Image: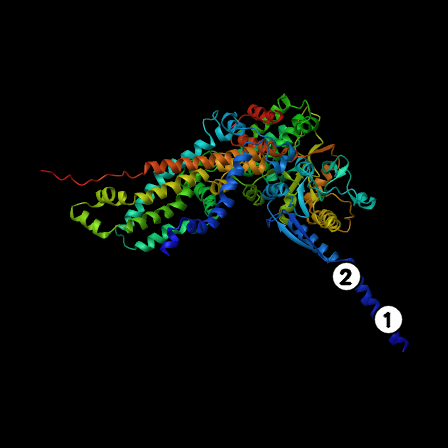
Amino acid sequence: MKRVLSNKWSIAVFVLPTVLFFTYIVIIPIIKTAVYSMLSEIPAIAKEDSHFVGLDNYVTMFTQGKRNAWWNTDLGTSAVINSLKYAASSVFIQLPFAMFIALLLVNGVKGESFYRNIFFIPVVISSVVVSLLWQRIYKDLLPNLYDILGMQMPKGGILANKDTKMWAVFIPVLWQYVGYHMLLMYGALRSISTDIIEAATVDGATGARLAFRIQIPMIKPMLKVCLSFSLIGSFKLFDTPWILLERSNKSLPALSMYIEMFQNHKYSYASAQAMFIVVECLIFTVLLNVLFREKKEKYSLPRKETA
Amino acid sequence: MKKFVALVLAVVMMLSLTTVFAEEHEEVTLDCHVIWSAETEANREPFLKTMEEFQAAYPWIKVNLVMDEANAWKDAGETLALSDSLPDVFYWNAGGVLWNLVGSGDILPLNDYLTDDIMSRIEGGTLTDMTFDGKIYQLPYTKACSALYCNTELFDQYGVKIPETWDELIEAVKTFKAAGVTPMTVGGSDQWPTNMYTDIINLRFAGDAACRACYYKTEGATFKTQDWLDGMNAFKQLIDLGAFPDNAASLTRDESEVAYFAGEIPMYVHGQWFAGSLSAEMQQKVKAVKFPTVEGKDTDNQWMGGAAEGFCVSSYTKHPDEAFILCQFLAEGLSKNGFISGAGLPAWKYDFSAYTDINPVLLQIVEATSTAESFLLWGNTALTGEDATLIGATVYQLLNGEITAEEWCDEMETIFQ
């Protein structure tokens, strides 16, 4: 067995089916999308009229005027900026909240497994169900609450008012996925050796100090995973806003891409937007890798003093 | 003995006939995709009844039926067309969206199948938006139009006259508002219900010719005229008067209609199919009338609508003969059953004198449209692709207070660029 595994040809033979399959279902579609994004229209609908236009579709994404929700400088907002706002909200609100719950649970709370399951329940519910549930909260329960409190509802309703709709989408996403991140962090915190925790406790580290100096630094690899999921999820966010917001809302990259492709039938332009999302996700993944790169410390034995 | 021989011969003949029929009507399976998936859809029951009648009349044609929501099917159908995989027979809108599929060769022209007898049964003028270069690509099942549905109980209760002119409409809105009653409703979130209001108002202010020129992008057409601006400002006036619920922009069509069905809203502009959604009790309270006219404009008898929906056969069906039979049966059958059930106006000629319990609201619309001068397809149906998305999105923005009437005209003008 050892001989087989040390033979590079043997490894190649075993890996080949997976590489071929991965290439077929991931690499080739990405390359095809990249090619489509540089055509005037995709061959399936334009047939002989399809021709190479270089980066025109990418230029359009960032230069078209007021009608372009992708990069709408006139209104001081854009789909890309909105997705970055969601990403920031996820990183600075969702993940700290998940970490807080994970630390609470791991540091000993009565009914730990009960709470863990409660927080995880939204994760197993379909996003569509979660969105419909929150739709009823926004449209039926909240107006009643505003009435009881004698307050004025935001103009147009929570889901239509431009000052509230972004948060109205973010809250269900936070509610749904905070349990997911909590469970990942909880698992990582649980895997820290009790010896280390006990040693730190003996040295006087408790509460916040224990969390910030010992527990959080020791789960850095898992934090990186959570950050990746959180950022990429924000850039690709589609289902919740699609259900909650009005039809043809293009305020997020994935929504804009879908509408350009399936409603407006601008397939090559939508392919350019798809490529932007892919590249954006890759860039942030690389940035995270750089951010979390462990410093390799070099150790050398002290030189022997020679007489 | 003679009896026995006669019996044997009769049995042999019966058996041979069975064989002949079996050979003539080889079992065929067709895929059929329609809308009306929601239980509340007025056309759902008449359509299912028509389908039952079809299965009884043509037992050898099996139908794989898929029902969907209208917007979802529109998006899915256009995507299926790209891969030449539209079902054999399917529901589709007329006008620009049909033209898109005709242009890409996805729809079978039906001229060869339409005999003089069939053509004589179709209501005149209903094939206008289904015919391109002399070829008929779709068969209508209804004539559509929008009307103003007035709850007479509320009008009587608050002493308000059913409006016939724009000024009377504004007066009615003000009176209801002052009495704490929300005068109208609209499902802004779905966007197209708002188009029902803006289209008819623009028709009253700009007229059929100007609207038609813009929706069909005729050379020289423009949205930047005083008439269009006046129309959109008139709609803005309704918004500013508080004619619609405060949260209208976040309501779907279904949600917006709940209050009307509960008898809390006095006025609603919607398609004729809405008449079929009214309960028997509401049918006695509601009066469908022509949308108020505008003084000084010669547009009083112009209507939004026409034959805007029908059934098509895909050009790549493996069974074109059977697909046509299904298409024609559904169109004619739904035309009859839909009218009887109160879901829509018939697009096929039929003697309805035997039916005495037809929806009275629908009969009011038939009466009101009997003197119609013209029918114009709604903007979001006549326009296609990005332009259709734009008209939906911009009326939503106007409803939500995000843009002005001038900005709406500027935005719509970009469809000519």
Percent of width and height locating residue B223: 62, 24
Disc 2 secondary structure class: helix
Write the residue at 36% across / 46% down. A181
Write the residue at 56% across / 45% down. B262
Percent of width and height locating residue A110: 27, 54
**The disc label shown at residue A95, or none:** none
Determine whether B379 is above or below A114 in the image: above
- Residue sticking out furthest to the right: B2
Q: Can you identify the residue that label 1 sits on?
A: B9
Q: Can you identify the residue that label 2 sits on?
A: B22
Query: Which badge, 1 or 2, is on the more N-terminal residue?
Result: 1
Task: Tell me if I can see residue B67 in this picture.
Answer: yes
- Residue sticking out furthest to the bottom: B1
Q: Nearer the viewer, residue A188 or B225?
A: A188
Query: Residue A91 sits in which quadrant?
Result: top left
Percent of width and height locating residue A276: 48, 34
Disc 1 secondary structure class: helix
